[in-house]
Image (cartoon, rainbow, N blue to C red):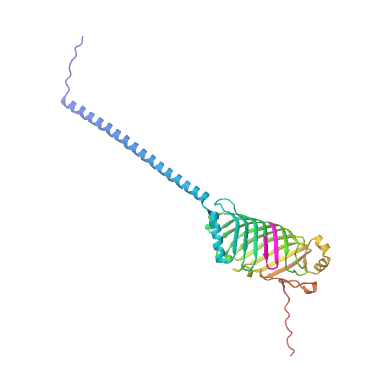
Amino acid sequence: MAKEKDIDLDPELEDELSEDELIQESLLEDGESNEISEGEEDNKQLDSSKILMLVGLGILAFVFFFFFTFPLNEIVRSVLAESSKETGIVLEAKEIHFPFFGRKSFDSFVAQFASGTVIKAEELSFSLSLFGLMSSRVEGDAEIGFLKYEGGEWSVQAKSVSFPIKISSIDDKITRWNGEGEILLSGGKFFESMEIPMLGSLKGHEIKKASFQFKIRSGKVMIEKGLIDSSIAKIQFQGVIRLSDSISLSQLEIKACASLNDKFAQERQDIAGLVTLLPQENGKICIPIRGSISSPKVDIPNLNQLGGTNSNIQTEQPSVEPNPPAP
């Protein structure tokens, strides 16, 4: 049998082994500390993510609460009341639906001016971007059901009016506005009207449909295409309205061309006969309209001889210069 022998280690080798053991122990301790520090950092990151998530949920909850429970309807009613005091134009509505998102609407809306003019709408709804309004822009559309205008000698009603519009910049002065839009009307009827040259009163006559396409540029409204289809005639408009800060003083430069409705021409043969004496283009009566919105003027030659009647619409008469005195 082999004999076991004890091996004596050199002291220097023992010292080296003990140093190796110490280094390994220190490395193990460093690894454990690194694992602990990495775990702490991960926990800190998780805590930060949770905090950010909670803050985000809180903000979303506040926005949801603000948008869907804030009483915008009553605020709008208060704004209308304050505006009425400042401008003298009484603005009222029986019911107001003014959500932050979506279409806004007014039921039984009334605007009454100091002059006595009243505009009524059974239903008024519109879609506008509130963020756009904050940046002085308007882009949206309005729809009006049963619109009625009463002012002076006029009383007119329309079953429906739609008004898509886009204005790139809103300023205190309307002469600085720029944009474009369209007005569409149907089911109109005159209940009262002033006396119109040759036609007389428009009371009882209807507007089947009407449309106006326009652009607003540097203080001018350019009517690119206008059409009124009525029980009297079909009228086409084109021209420019030079805006004034006072709307009633805005200047008109419009050309209106009309062709009589067959039924009306048969009922009013006197007017149909007189129409043939007026200036015509392509078989249509064409009349320039000038003056201001509050005081329009039509250039109809020899209107009095054609049976014109007194009205608030003025006619332009050619000026006659006096003959110079004989030498």
Q: Quadrant of the N terminus?
A: top left
Q: How many marks?
A: 0
Position of 110 relative to 38 (above/below): below
| Magenta residue check for 189 | no
Which residue: 55% across, 57% down?
Answer: 76
Left or right: 220 as drawn, with respect to 307 = left
Report x, y in % for residue 2: 20, 11
Q: Quadrant of residue 29?
A: top left
Side of 272 relative to 39 (left or right): right
151 within the magenta span: yes
Chief secondary structure of the magenta span?
A: strand
Q: Is residue 291 left or right of residue 85?
A: right
Residue 194 in the image: state x and y as whole percent: 73, 68
Quarter containing the C terminus:
bottom right
Residue 122 picture quarter:
bottom right
Q: Which region shows up in magenta?
A: 148-159
Q: Residue at image x 38%, y 41%?
A: 47
